[in-house]
Image (cartoon, grey):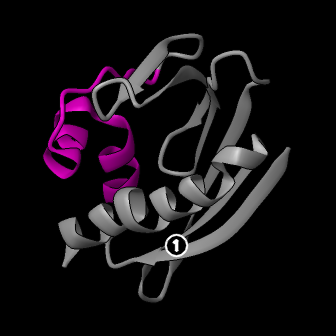
């Protein structure tokens, strides 16, 4: 199992970024797919037509998102996303643990291109 840590910067306020990551209507805009999302701890979520599924664990409005991502028979992966105000907008601190070795490269590419790449396009 591996872990991934990276910082991203988006040219939007932490409020806008948090909304784009938690509001199902906004998530559908930048993913182009139906989504199931709630900010209720213990609720399940689904992004990219079920390619990513899991459980929402913790939310702090405009500051923190913690989720458990499911990998089938593998151990669950914990994703922690912290949002910080930055002079350019929002700095995002991403930390994901327990990534299966065979999924690591795909996961990193997905964060860079699909997840934060699409969010970056939303705000440019």
In this view, the residue in front, 115 or 50, is 50
- Which image quadrant: the C terminus? bottom left
Tell whether 19 sits left or right of 93. left
Q: Which residue is outermost to the right? A: 1
Q: Position of residue 123 (x, y in %)?
A: 22, 71
Q: Quarter-wise, where is residue 33 in the image?
A: top left
Residue 18 lies in the magenta stretch:
yes
Is residue 97 at least partly visible in the picture? Answer: no
Q: Which residue is outermost to the front? A: 102
Q: Quarter-wise, where is residue 95 in the image?
A: bottom right
Vertical comparison of 57 with 27: above or below: above
Q: Quarter-wise, where is residue 67 in the image?
A: top right
Q: Which residue is outermost to the bottom? A: 87
In this view, the residue in front, 89 or 95, is 95
Total number of numbered discs in the rendering: 1
Tell whether 82 sits left or right of 51. right
Tell whether 116 sits left or right of 44. left
Dot 1 surroundings within 10 Å: few (below 14), some, or many (20 or more)? some
Q: Secondary structure at mark 1?
A: strand
Is residue 69 at least partly visible in the picture? Answer: yes
Residue 28 lies in the magenta stretch:
yes
Q: Residue at x 52, y 73 (%)?
A: 85
In this view, the residue in front, 74 or 28, is 74
Q: Residue at x 25, y 41 (%)?
A: 27
Q: Position of residue 105 (x, y in %)?
A: 62, 60
Q: Position of residue 53 (x, y in %)?
A: 48, 24
- Which image quadrant: the N terminus? top right
Main SS of the magenta part reads helix
Q: Residue at x 72, y 34 (%)?
A: 77
Vertical comparison of 65 with 35: above or below: below
Q: Which residues lie in the magenta part?
A: 15-39
Query: Which residue bears the numbered disc 1?
Result: 85
């Amino acid at each position: 199992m591996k872990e991934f840590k990276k910082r991203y910067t988006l040219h939007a306020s932490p409020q806008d970024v948090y909304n784009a990551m938690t509001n199902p209507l906004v998530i559908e805009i930048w993913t182009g797919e139906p989504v199931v999302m709630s900010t209720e701890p213990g609720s399940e979520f689904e992004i990219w037509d079920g390619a990513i599924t899991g459980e929402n664990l913790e939310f702090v409005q405009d500051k923190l998102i913690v989720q458990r991502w499911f990998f089938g028979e593998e151990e669950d992966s914990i994703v922690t996303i912290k949002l910080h105000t930055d002079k350019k907008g929002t700095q995002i601190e991403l930390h994901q643990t327990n990534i299966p070795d065979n999924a690591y490269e795909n996961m990193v590419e997905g964060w860079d291109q699909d997840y934060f790449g699409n969010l970056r396009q939303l705000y440019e």
